[in-house]
Amino acid sequence: MEWFNQSTSVKYLFKYINKGYDRITVVIEPTDGGASQAPGNIDEVKQYLDCRYVSPSEACWRIFKFPIHGRQPAVERLYFHLPREQPVYFNDHEDIDNILSRPIVSESMFTSWMESNKKYPEGRTLGYAQYVSKFVYVKKTRSWKPRKSGYTIGRLIWVSPCTSELYYLRMMLTVVKGSTCFEDIRTFSNIQYETFRDACFACGLLKDDREYIEALREVNDWGSGFYLRKLFVTMLLSTSMNRPNHVWENTWQWLSDGILYNQRNISNNQGLVLSDEQLQNLTLLEIEKPLEGNRRSLKEYPSMPYPNGYITSQLGNRLIYQELNYDTDELKRNFHTFFNSLTEEQYQIFKTIMQAVNRQEGRMFFLYGYGGTGKTHMWRPLTYALRSPKHIVLTVASSSIASLLLPGGRTTHSKYKLTVPTFDNSVCNIHQGTELAELLK
């Protein structure tokens, strides 16, 4: 680190004295005897001259064509990827078969490094970041060859902890040497691990997340189960836990606080008893809800368990359950309040739309009006009238501000999974069989 600090300092000083021309500012002021105009009428714009001055040392340096700026040694960015996940670049009009037949699809800088370790035994003592000090990557042939002269520093590209296995692959590349395949990178002390995460734990690169368990233990002394689950979701979203399943296994009893009480109230059976498996699945469902509000899911954390199928089928589709989980008494009160305030024109609109819904005619209506004419006021009694008898109404708007004015409103991009930005050929990112697809059905 000291060498890099010295290099940075020298580079800064070297660039500082050569970063631009020396300049001098000259001002012409009239004397008392020969002033052509009064002192108060001096035109500063015309009188000031910005002159260029080239010192003798700079002139000689440029005459002999010495380099003005340089960097030594060179730094090369080293790319890596998971198996069969290397980037492939192509034009949209190219044939897919021709693209897949290219060697670049199966060969990359990273895979070529592993092939090079099979060819050059002297490279097996070097890590991936150290490899460029003795070898040079030739892009044209997609291969490495021994370096004849010069010295280069390798730098692994940075990746976010959110990338999961790719992040742990980068950590392993800082310690492994001479790997000839992806399995070698996941091997430590002659033991091959299933994931790069497990290999990182075996190498001692990751902690055991004990501080997160202690944090939940401390909060359990004064916080409710709802707050504990909210804190656990925050930990998951931060992507700072190395083994979230380990934290879950040691804290699920605290996270399930209040679940049994709520189920007893729902079933109106104060003697209801649930097994540990049922409590765990119900707790996972409660954790999944705030995760979905942040457009994440437990499925994005492979080490975390996911609710069993029979539990989710017993409680139904979570998105449908959310749309049916409104307070019907409050909806009825709100409906009467807004319905009584409708004008004659608004009442006719309400009547026409409700008739189409009750008859299942599947019509489309476009309500047009200037700002402040009561368009949003029109949607509220319609929504309350349909949700109070346990019908599903999806209220969406194109902007987030407009969605806040609608009861249970969401933006169109969020609800229908539209891409950002949206193009003419964009489609909704809704897959068959998902809960959102079932909700729309």
Image (cartoon, grey):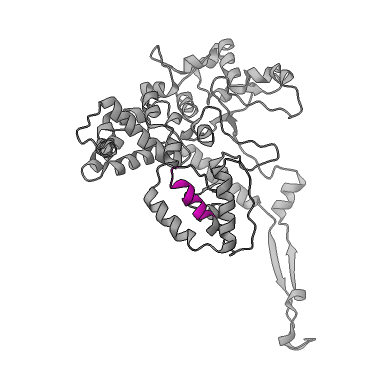
Q: Is residue 192 visible?
A: yes
Q: In the rendering, at what x and y percent does residue 275 appear?
A: 25, 26
Q: In the rendering, at what x and y percent does residue 332 appear?
A: 41, 53
Foreground pick, 159 / 126: 159
Relative to residue 203, is residue 390 depicted above or below?
below
Query: Left or right of 352: which side holds 104?
Result: right
Query: Left or right of 142: which side holds 328?
Result: left
Residue 416 among those drawn in magenta: no
Foreground pick, 361 / 51: 361
Q: Is residue 11 visible?
A: no
How many numbered callouts?
0
Please give the name of the residue rendered at 50% of the width and 55% of the height, measured from the top-left corner.
380
Foreground pick, 47 / 225: 225
The quarter of the displayed image where residue 85 is located: top right
Please give the name of the residue rendered at 44% of the width and 58% of the height, measured from the top-left corner.
336
Foreground pick, 85 / 11: 85
Please give the name of the residue rendered at 73% of the width and 49% of the height, measured from the top-left corner.
60
- Majority secondary structure of the magenta segment? helix
Magenta-drawn segment = 379-390
Please give the name of the residue rendered at 53% of the width and 42% of the height, measured from the top-left corner.
415
Relative to residue 394, is residue 161 depicted above or below?
above
Q: In the rendering, at what x and y percent does residue 160 appear?
A: 49, 35
